[in-house]
Image (cartoon, rainbow, N blue to C red):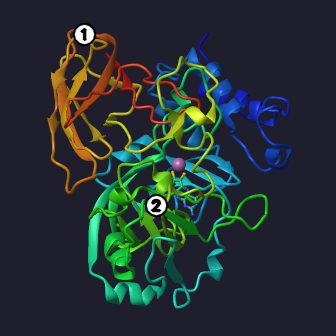
């Protein structure tokens, strides 16, 4: 049963307007204004799964490119090449072809909002302040943006930001939450001051164990509370690469990515990287802001069978993300002439670690070829890789990519440890290749 692109799109639009589809998934307050909730994406995948190679299993970029060209009902100023998952809050991922750039361009960097950003017109640079306080801060201090820039040394680091739920789309059995495919990840140069320098200037008490951030965004419910306030242990907060940044790729941070000031912490779920930053607290206990507890960014402390309901008492905070890689060129579905080698390239990263080697397979993992892997530009940046493969016959192939980190740990070829939040899915990326 082969469906034309037009037919797929028509069926998909019909699916989006079917009110019953996600009745049990979408809170009624959001139903009218949100679109593309998990259910519809999953329905879409099964709808076209039969006609598109790898539509459901890992190489999902094809669906995105197909739909994103015409179907997203709105866009955000200054952003392009994004697939919009919802509009309230705004969540949008980068199309796989834009992850092929050495560093993710500001207009292509994904957006993950938990609430409503501060209104852009209310952001006044001359008034923006950052408050450092908390029970383990010796001298609570407020810095104007200009003071921060003047008082501390500036640093630029390229850092990988990846949403903890990236690739949740491929989690089986499926779980609730944004159905991110490949693109809730990006890497680019952030410029700012070290969190360490700022915290040390305010004095860190001996009993400090954690930091927490507060942004200027507000929760969807209108309660006035922040929608998210997360943090990291002191050892991560005090790393050289942990920045309070005002620039991304040499320009003001895009509004949706936290303008005018954000925390940037590489290698951990990007939920620890607070946007629209107004306050950092130094805590004498594990930070307990919204989305630090329950099922948020937490995984079972010991492995569970897929589909298990896990008691929050047995959940632990997700820290460093696992080793992972992407094939960013060519895109899945490519046709390549027989007798000519195919050039592949992509990115690899490994949470707190670096990537030590990169391999590709054209026979479902039976044999692996070593790829050429570059060193990261700095710690916690992604690494570029490339390889050439030749196919022994015409026909259908898949290219699989697998990174191995500096401790010898590789990506799993299928979904790794299932968890109720669908976090940290680092299964090998695969693309479909037709040799003609
Ligand atoms: N203030 C604030 N910071 C935030 C968030 C948010 O909703 N509000 N979302 C977090 C999450 S879950 C992620 S994945 C990253 C996304 O960063 P980006 O939108 O710049 O890609 O920001 C984090 N920081
Ligand atoms: Mo996230």
Say left or right for 291 vs 251. right
Question: Where residue 163 sits in the image (x, y, percent)?
Answer: 48, 46
Residue, far front: 207
Q: Are marks 1 and 2 in contact (CB under 8 Å)?
A: no
Q: Residue at x 70, y 30 (%)?
A: 39
Q: Residue at x 59, y 30 (%)?
A: 420
Residue 361: quadrant of the picture = top left
Quadrant position of the N terminus in the picture: top right
Check mark 1 vs ligand 2: CB closer than 8 Å? yes or no: no
Secondary structure category for the residue under label 2: helix
Q: Residue at x 60, y 61 (%)?
A: 76
Say left or right for 211 vs 364. right
Say left or right for 354 vs 194. left
Q: CA distance from mark 1 to mark 2?
A: 39 Å
Residues 99 and 339: in front is 99
Residues 167 and 298: in front is 298
Question: Where residue 141 sits in the image (x, y, percent)?
Answer: 47, 85
According to the image, label 2 marks what residue? Answer: 107
Residue 340 visible in the shown view: no
The label on residue 4 is none
Counting residues from the start of the chain, the first of labels 1 and 2 encountered is 2
- How many marks do you count on the picture? 2
Quadrant position of the C terminus in the picture: top left
Badge 1 density bin: few <14, some 14–19, many ≥20, Cα 10 Å: few
Residues 251 and 270: in front is 270
Q: Work out whether 334 lies above or below 216.
A: above
Check mark 2 vs ligand 1: CB closer than 8 Å? yes or no: no
Q: Work out whether 77 lies above or below 19.
A: below
The label on residue 366 is 1
Question: Where residue 103 sits in the image (x, y, percent)?
Answer: 31, 55
**Disc number lying in front (1 or 2):** 1
Residue 309: quadrant of the picture = top right
């Amino acid at each position: 049963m082969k469906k034309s692109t037009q037919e797929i799109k028509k069926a998909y639009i019909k699916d989006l307007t079917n009110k019953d589809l996600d009745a049990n998934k979408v809170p009624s307050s959001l139903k009218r204004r949100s679109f593309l909730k998990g259910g519809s994406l999953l329905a879409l995948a099964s709808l076209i799964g039969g006609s598109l190679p790898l539509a459901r299993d890992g190489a999902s970029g094809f669906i995105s490119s197909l739909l994103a060209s015409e179907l997203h009902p709105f866009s955000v100023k200054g952003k392009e090449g994004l697939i919009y998952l919802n509009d309230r809050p705004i969540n949008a991922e980068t199309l796989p072809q834009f992850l092929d750039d050495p560093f993710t361009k500001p207009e292509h960097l994904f957006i993950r909002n938990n609430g409503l950003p501060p209104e852009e017109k209310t952001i006044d640079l001359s008034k923006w302040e950052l408050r450092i306080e908390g029970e383990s801060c010796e001298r609570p201090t407020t810095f104007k943006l200009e003071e921060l820039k003047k008082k501390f040394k500036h640093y630029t680091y390229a850092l990988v930001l990846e949403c903890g739920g990236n690739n949740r789309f491929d989690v089986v059995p499926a779980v609730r939450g944004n159905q991110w495919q490949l693109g809730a990840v990006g890497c680019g140069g952030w410029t700012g001051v070290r969190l360490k320098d700022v915290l040390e200037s305010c004095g860190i008490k001996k009993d400090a164990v954690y930091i927490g951030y507060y942004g200027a965004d507000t929760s969807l419910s209108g309660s006035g509370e922040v929608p998210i306030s997360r943090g990291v242990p002191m050892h991560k907060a005090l790393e050289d690469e942990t920045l309070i940044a005002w620039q991304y790729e040499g320009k003001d941070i895009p509004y949706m990515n936290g303008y005018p000031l954000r925390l940037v912490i590489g290698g951990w779920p990007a939920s620890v990287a607070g946007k629209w930053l107004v306050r950092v607290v130094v805590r004498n206990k594990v930070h307990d802001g919204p989305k630090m507890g329950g099922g948020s960014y937490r995984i079972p402390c010991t492995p569970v069978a897929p589909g298990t309901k896990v008691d929050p008492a047995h959940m632990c905070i997700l820290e460093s993300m696992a080793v992972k890689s992407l094939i960013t060129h060519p895109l899945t579905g490519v046709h390549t002439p027989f007798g000519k080698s195919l050039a592949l390239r992509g990115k690899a990263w490994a949470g707190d670690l670096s990537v030590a080697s990169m391999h590709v397979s054209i026979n479902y993992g039976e044999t692996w070829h070593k790829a050429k892997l570059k060193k990261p530009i700095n710690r916690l940046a992604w690494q570029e890789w490339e390889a050439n493969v030749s196919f022994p016959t015409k026909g259908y192939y898949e290219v699989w990519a697998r990174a191995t980190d500096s401790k010898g740990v590789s990506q799993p070829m299928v979904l790794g440890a299932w968890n109720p939040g669908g976090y940290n899915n680092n299964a090998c990326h695969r693309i479909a290749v037709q040799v003609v």
